[in-house]
Image (cartoon, grey):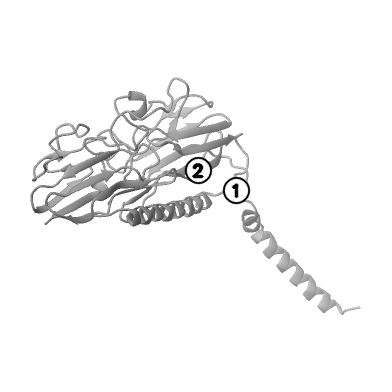
Amino acid sequence: MPPKSARSRRSSVFLAVFALLLAAMPALLASNAHAASPTKARTWNVMVGAESSSGAVQTMGYGPKKIWINAGDTVRWVSNSMEPHTVSFINDKHPAVEFDLATPYMSAQTPKGTISRPGQFRSSGIMIPEPDAIFPDAVDSYDLKFLKPGRYPYICYLHGKAMRAVVVVRKAGKPYPHTQAEYNAMATEAANADIEHGLNLWADALGAADSHHVFMGASDMRAMVNRFIAGSIVVRVGDSVTFDMARNAFPVPHTVTFGPPPANPFAPTGDPTNFQGGALSSGVILPAGFGPPPSTFTVKFTKAGTYTYVCLLHAGMGMVGQVVVQ
């Protein structure tokens, strides 16, 4: 049998270790559960869109696409790209048809800041980092409080089926399955993958373009490239160049606009059969199958010079091209 002094020392060591374990228990529990049963409502952030460092590639995604919250919580959507988007909980009276800026329910924010059941219509209105001439009433964030459990799907009115997500609302007090940091990591990973996908779309289009055939961007259900491909070409006097929407798989609009912008950016102006400089614009061009606007625009250059042109809808993102006529 150990002497009394040894037993006392062992008892002291045991008590000290036990005390340390008790002190560390909250941290250990927190590391094994994403959150204890919450007692307060929380606000969760979701990114709206993403873009490459140059702004050339814009993604069609919410980050994350699925989030689990509790009744009483708020979700704050934050604009994360120059491409305009909406956060829209639609219903039969406010369907996701082809976007039209003149349709109020598509472009304006609903006044109520709460939602209590799936099927109630709520919408952010147009979301971009800063308002501009086309979207003067745009917002850079949108908050919505969810009052009751349910599955709440939402879309972007501008990009339709290409941009969908869902908020899953559980009863108040349930432990959260993910932290905000984990949602942020999910969003970043998905955005980086979508941007890489967009860069591949760009490279594929560039391989198919030539000095007489310029693609007006490239897009699919994940990403869009807001660039003329190729951005700078050289032709001869008398040559024609066709600007083509064929690399776009959904109805993203572009224009080819030389000279000062027209009063109506959506309508064609000038004579593309004999271009010698000055004002010329295609008006809105859409991919084939999404008309009535045409899907191509051909310009015949009849005078030497260097001619710069833009897409009126995406010039702020760097969608600018150049034709050198020799």
- Secondary structure type for disc 2: loop
Which residue bears the numbered disc 1? 35
Quarter of the image where the N terminus is located = bottom right
- Residue 194 seen from this side: yes
Q: Spot the residue most to the right.
A: 1
Q: Position of residue 297 (x, y in %)?
A: 23, 40
Q: Residues within 10 Å of mark 1 (few under 14, many from 20)?
A: some
Q: Residue furthest front?
A: 238
Quadrant position of the C terminus in the picture? bottom left
Counting from the top left corner in percent of width and height, residue 21 is at 69, 62
Q: Residue at x 75, y 71 (%)?
A: 12
User: Residue 67 placed where, x, y %?
Assistant: 53, 42
Circle 2 residue: 65
Q: Amino acid at mark 1?
A: Ala
Q: Amino acid at mark 2?
A: Lys
Residue furthest to the top? 93
Q: Crowding near pointer 2: few (<14 within 10 Å), some, many (20+)?
A: many
Where residue 81 appears, as percent x and y from the top left, is 35, 46
Question: Dot 1 lies on which element?
Answer: loop
